[in-house]
Amino acid sequence: MNNFIFQNATKVYFGKGCVKEYLACLTKPFQTIMLAYGGGSVKRNGIYSEVAGILREAGKIIVDFPGIMANPTYAKVQEGARLARETQADMILAVGGGSVMDCCKAAALAARYQGDVWEDFWAHPGVIDVEPLPLGVVVTVAGTGSECNGGAVITHEEKKIKTGRDYPKLNPRFALMDPTYTYSVPVRQMVSGGFDILSHIMETYFSGPDDDNVSDDIMEALMKSVIRNLRAAVWDQEDYTARSNLMWDSTMAENRLIKLGKKCDFQCHNMEHQLGAYTDCNHGCGLAVLHPVYYRHIYREGLPKFVRFAENVWGISREGKSDEELALAGIDALAAFIREMGLPTTLKELGASRDQLKEIASSCGISAGSYKKLTHKEILEIFQECYEEKE
Ligand code: NZQ
Ligand code: ZN
């Protein structure tokens, strides 16, 4: 894939060497930069020293904001906002994956907002009438697509709620995306991020309206790309073509483009987020456990689309099969891919305990865009079905 520049609300600089080439120029208007990152991978793989070196050479004051955890908490958001205010940072640079980017989006808002951002924006959507601190991102793992939207998923630990909101004002100003930065992502995290991409596409694809629309065609191409390139990247973790495709697939899935004209489901995300709020499980792994079981619950209500998924995404032949058999064969192919990638298949593996399931199920949001509107009772059935492998 050749390097290119793409712009929606976020301007994307994509390709090998893009950080070296563009970071100094992009940070020119700012003086004090809060450099945010996760648990330390960027220190081990050299990304931190490359980024900090460029900023130092450009004469910037760097304020470190380390330790952003997977599934970022509201407490961490407040810590970031406080630090930005105290140091008078005039921009935040998030270097990491979805967790770092999301925490920084919320901190960028909280740093400039007088009230409580959880109560006013995450507990229920509000209208943002303040200008958040400028935010730029350097993406180090493909998955969430957070680099090109205003979405930020935050966990309120005491309230046991993990929820996301998408505000255009929180779109990063720029996203630097160098696929080679993802070479060091552990395989388990790579396949989890890959499954998150697939999930974002499926959660959009399996929703109305189902008349001929280019979004569904684009999504079939994207799903095939994720499946093919994830296999290639598992085989060779430094396959630049595969890493490039995965990185751009993840952006394409969540830059709002494919959602145009679609209702969107995101019931699996609603369920996974609450599993995360209770167990702190890995996002993509939680989704991998839920998707096949959820689809076996709803496929009858969206049968033609599940048939199309089986034929167009998995290449399953219709020969001798009823629509229902074909739809189920597509879901089976998805489940087989999850196993092939070594992703978990049970909630037990994610660390959930059986006696928590009822409480978690009743805390889940219900999607209005699903082919079949679930009840909390049915969510509990889904959780119980995927709790552990059947004998
Ligand atoms: O913390 P460090 O040490 O940096 O390690 C991270 C972390 O352990 C590691 N990692 C990242 N880049 C690496 C690397 N390790 C080696 N080399 C690299 N280059 O990967 C681990 C996971 O990172 P994380 O940021 O948590 O992963 P991901 O990008 O999957 O983000 C998950 C979070 O995003 C939310 C999820 O719910 C979860 O909280 N989501 C955000 C969305 C959005 N804003 O649009 C949409 C998604 O549906 C999702 O809900
Ligand atoms: Zn996701």
Image: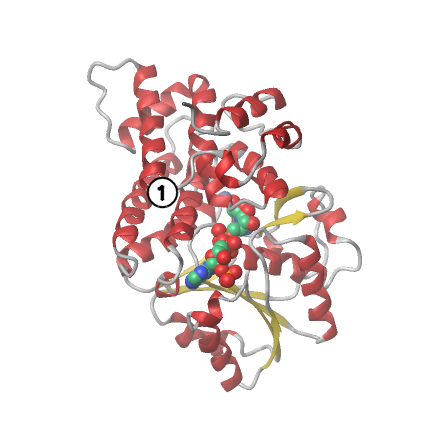
Q: Residue furthest right?
A: 115
State the image quarter where residue 383 is shown: top right
Q: Is 201 situated above or below 120?
A: above
Q: Position of residue 220 (x, y in %)?
A: 33, 37
State the image quarter where residue 67 is shown: bottom right
Q: Residue at the spot x=69%, y=42% of the render?
A: 160
Q: Nearer the viewer, residue 167 or 44?
A: 44
Q: Nearer the viewer, residue 211 or 226?
A: 226
Q: Residue furthest front?
A: 391
Q: Residue at the spot x=51%, y=46% of the render?
A: 282
Q: Amino acid at mark 1?
A: Gly
Q: Position of residue 98 (x, y in %)?
A: 52, 54
Q: Is 186 situated above or below 364?
A: below
**Residue matched to label 1:** 342
Q: Nearer the viewer, residue 104 or 273?
A: 273
Q: Residue at the spot x=67%, y=59% of the render?
A: 76
Q: Secondary structure at mark 1?
A: loop
Residue 260 appears in the figure: no
Q: Position of residue 162 (x, y in %)?
A: 63, 43
110 vs 276, left or right, is right
